[in-house]
Image (cartoon, rainbow, N blue to C red):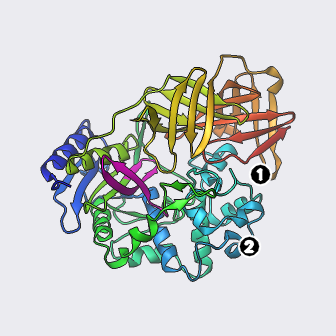
């Protein structure tokens, strides 16, 4: 391993943040560090479009899902109260069905099949802005208990496991906000988007009208509630690298190998994702809230780290952090890979794959593709892809599951599917008319465009605040199952 090139890392970070300084726009900061110092600190853009104050390494942002490894560290501290091998139902007896049997470990390592609350609510017609509270959310999860897949059979990202483990710890008297505050980094963990946080800067996303304030109504939970600055997150990263203080033992325990039920290893640990950059092993996690992007990326063997935070939605946080780490360590970036573009369907499942340039999107979750011995692979631990083109489509693995996708032929939406469809348990409904689907009430009623995927399956595409919302509808007689990347359990019936 060569000595770290701090000058190259600083130049790379400066070049990456430079566009944020243009046109009075939101910004962010990138820091690079070892266990003892932070030689690289680059920031640009504004922390507030209202005040015009510049963004700095001390601007307070929402860390979003970077929070996850901190909740996992809390569970480790209180393993005697909530152990990894315990089923969730032991601590949350209101859970029923398969959900009650998911272990704490599988809830944290993304192999539990737990449907994501936010995507489930979106499929019921609630927007990203709709406010919800923790009690009703737990009731909502407990009402059914269905899973996206059998535990241990694949890996797919879900925030729900962290929400449930936090609730289990709280039942034992251990509160996440107290734990986060005790670590000594000035962190706070608000429960809702609307709780005041000292120094918290607004997050922004952009539409046709320009920059918009980011908001989200979902109760935050310890899947993504932490707030703090880039500098505070880098100091935490230093403690992890030094294996000291409140971070002692964290990497050994939380980046240890995890396995599917058949013994195959995964690259996602307990709130930490593993990867590689050339010959360098990486560990870290990203975060994304409406208007905020974050990444903590560590190279433990080299004793180096990179932190990125931003208060703008359009930041590819992992890609940027990886570029700075590559410059710091003198490692090459992996070459991009491409697959034949277009829309593909996985026969017999209601699943789809959308390929454009060097990006593949499975069930609406997109990943950049890179070359690996004739395969196009993602660098994502929680959405691993290994794909290649064939004579009749695309084959390989997604989520560690073997899959085959065939091109979707153009076709009209069947008029027989038009009319109302209802989900009586949750008092939800949508209406199909031609190639349009309408969902919601009053002036908040939104519309999605429908495309035919074949085999009685439709693909719906709509907007939900800063993000596109996509889901499939797989019809079977008078019932239809809705499927998105993180929620595959909701069924509606003809109204």
CA distance separating discs 2 and 1: 21 Å
Could you tell me if residue 436 is visible in this image?
yes
Name the spot of residue 296 as percent of width and height, x first: 35, 57
Percent coordinates x, y for residue 92 in the rendering: 69, 72
Which of 318 and 493 lies nearest the eye of the viewer?
318
Residue closer to the observer: 490 or 388: 388
Please tell me whether residue 344 belongs to the stretch shown in magenta: no
Residue annotated with mark 2: 93
Please name whichever residue, 478 or 373, is drawn nearer the observer in this view of the structure.
373
- In the rendered structure, which segment of residues is drawn in magenta? 270-294
Q: Is residue 261 left or right of residue 174?
A: right
Query: In the displayed structure, would residue 245 be above or below residue 158?
Result: below
- The secondary structure type at the circle numbered 1 is helix
Where residue 320 sits, quadrant-wise, is: top left
Where is residue 343? Give x, y as percent. 58, 25
| Numbered disc 2: secondary structure | loop
Is 340 drawn above or below residue 300 in the view shown? above
What residue is shown at x 58% (from left), y 51% (from top)?
Answer: 155
Q: Is residue 405 found left or right of 187 in the rendered image?
A: right
Image-quadrant location for residue 45: top left
> Is residue 440 depicted above or below 69 in this figure?
above
**Which label belongs to residue 426?**
1
> Chief secondary structure of the magenta span?
strand
Residue 423 image offset from top left, x and y in percent: 79, 45
Q: Name the residue rendered at 61%, 40% in the picture.
A: 402
| Closer-to-camera residue (194/493) | 493
Q: Please indicate whether residue 164 sits to the left or right of residue 338 in the image.
A: right
Q: Quadrant of the C terminus?
A: top right
Residue 274 located within the stretch drawn in magenta = yes
Q: Residue at x 52, y 26 (%)?
A: 389
In this rendering, position of residue 378 left or right of residue 278 = right
């Amino acid at each position: 391993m060569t000595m770290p090139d701090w000058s190259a890392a600083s130049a790379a970070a400066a070049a990456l943040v430079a566009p944020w300084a243009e046109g009075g726009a939101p910004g962010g900061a990138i820091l690079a560090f070892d266990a003892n110092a932070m030689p690289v600190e680059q920031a640009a853009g504004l922390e507030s479009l209202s005040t015009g104050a510049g963004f700095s390494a001390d601007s307070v942002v929402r860390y979003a899902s970077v929070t996850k490894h901190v909740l996992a560290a809390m569970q480790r501290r209180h393993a005697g109260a909530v152990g990894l091998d315990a089923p969730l139902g032991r601590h949350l007896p209101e859970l029923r069905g398969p959900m009650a049997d998911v272990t704490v470990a599988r809830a944290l390592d993304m192999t539990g099949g737990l449907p994501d609350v936010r995507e489930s609510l979106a499929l019921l017609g609630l927007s990203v802005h709709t406010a919800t509270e923790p009690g009703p959310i737990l009731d909502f999860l407990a009402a059914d208990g269905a899973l996206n897949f059998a535990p241990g059979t694949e890996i797919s990202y879900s925030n729900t496991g962290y929400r449930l483990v936090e609730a289990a710890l709280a039942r034992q008297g251990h509160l996440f906000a107290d734990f986060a505050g005790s670590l000594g980094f000035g962190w706070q963990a608000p429960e809702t988007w609307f709780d005041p946080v000292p120094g918290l800067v607004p997050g922004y996303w952009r539409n046709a009208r320009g920059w918009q304030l980011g908001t989200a109504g979902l109760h935050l939970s310890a899947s993504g509630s932490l707030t703090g600055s880039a500098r505070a997150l880098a100091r935490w990263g230093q403690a992890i690298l030094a294996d000291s203080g409140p971070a002692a033992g964290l990497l050994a325990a939380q980046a240890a190998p995890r396995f599917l039920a058949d013994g195959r290893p995964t690259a996602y640990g307990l709130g930490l994702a593993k990867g590689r950059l050339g010959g360098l092993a990486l560990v870290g996690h990203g975060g994304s809230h409406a208007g905020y992007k974050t990444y903590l990326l560590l190279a433990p063997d080299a004793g180096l780290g990179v932190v990125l935070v931003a208060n703008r939605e359009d930041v590819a946080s992992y890609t940027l952090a990886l570029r700075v780490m590559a410059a710091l360590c003198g490692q090459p970036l992996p070459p991009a890979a491409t697959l034949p573009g277009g829309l593909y369907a996985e026969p017999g499942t209601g699943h789809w794959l959308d390929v454009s340039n060097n990006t593949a999107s499975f069930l609406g979750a997109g990943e950049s593709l890179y070359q690996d011995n004739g395969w196009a692979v993602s660098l994502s631990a929680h959405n691993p892809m290994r794909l290649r083109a064939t004579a009749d489509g695309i084959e390989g693995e997604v989520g560690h599951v073997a899959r085959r996708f065939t091109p979707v032929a153009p076709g009209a939406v069947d008029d027989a599917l038009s009319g109302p469809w209802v989900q009586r348990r949750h008092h939800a409904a949508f209406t199909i008319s031609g190639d349009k689907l309408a969902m919601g009430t009053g002036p908040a009623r939104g519309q999605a465009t429908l495309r035919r995927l074949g085999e009685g399956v439709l693909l719906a595409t709509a907007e939900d605040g800063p993000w596109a919302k996509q889901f499939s509808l797989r019809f079977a007689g008078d019932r239809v199952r809705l499927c998105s990347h993180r929620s595959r359990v909701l069924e509606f019936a003809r109204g």
